[in-house]
Amino acid sequence: MQISFFEEFPNTENLSKLDLISFPIKLYLADYSIEGYKQYKKELQEKYKHIKEVIWWPVLNMKEGYWFSPWSKRKALLRTFDHLLYEKVPIMWDAEFPKKRMLLFTQMFWYFTNKKLIKAFFKKYQGKIYTAEYFTDNTFMKKFLESVCLIFDPNEYPITKIKMMYSSTNKRLTEGMMRYEIKDYKEKYKDKFAVGLGLLAWGINGNEALLSLEQLERDLNICKSLNVKEVVIFRIGGLTKEQTNLLKKYAS
């Protein structure tokens, strides 16, 4: 099973956790600019030979929405797409409601135009696209999130879907529910599907519950038993030696 990591805050302290790892990994690295991403990629892959791939996780300024959605500032979307116009770098599209919730109202004028823009980009981009998406087991919510471009169908777009199955923050995410949903996604999308696990450390919200070692082992066991190709763990900055030793048993 491919073990991968998100890192939302790529500073020296968080990236030093790469020293704990000896098995092959992929790294989904947040940065506001493609130039910053490329510099990190060059330096990290020169220093750490076990990093197979570094994927750019573009983020916006907080006032622009931070995450990507039809409610993100239009100028921010156009800027990001312009940066990627002649690129083929792998990207991770973090599909979430804007961090600044007021944008849900102030950007409604651009909502439908932005939806068309996002869909067109997904179909035209020459590089690999991963989408990080909310997890829900509710059929109505799945349809709603898909209708507002926060869920994407890998059979319609050339993407790999990462479902954020964070059992530390979602207490309803039982083993039975997790198994059922993973089986369903794998049946629909085969290997165009990966599982996000977490959290090992806080994200931008700064107050999320963190994953215990026992929870992490349970979730890894579920994914391994269902032949999940890749798990992406949020985030490497919270990694401990104990967690690394556990992950090594599942890495391939």
Image (spheres, rainbow, N blue to C red):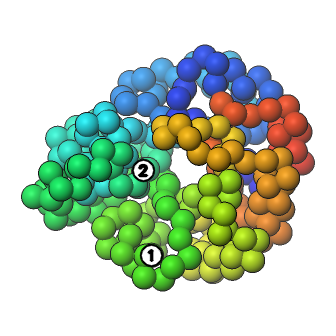
Q: Are marks 1 and 2 in contact (CB under 8 Å)?
A: no
> Who is closer to the viewer here, 114 or 193?
114
For disc 2, the neighbor class at 10 Å (few under 14, some 14 to 19, many from 20) is many
**To which quarter of the image does residue 190 belong?**
bottom right
> Who is closer to the viewer here, 42 or 225?
225
Q: Amino acid at mark 1?
A: Lys
- Percent across and percent down for residue 8 are 52, 35
Q: Residue at x 77, y 60 (%)?
A: 219
* Quadrant (top left, top right, bottom left, bottom right) of the N terminus: bottom right
- Percent across and percent down for residue 103 are 22, 49
- Percent across and percent down for residue 187 are 63, 80
* Disc 1/disc 2 C-alpha distance (Å): 18 Å
**To which quarter of the image does residue 99 belong?**
top left
Residue behind mark 1: 142
Residue behind mark 2: 93
> Counting residues from the N terminus, which is met first, the one under dot 1 or under dot 2?
2
Q: Amino acid at mark 2?
A: Trp
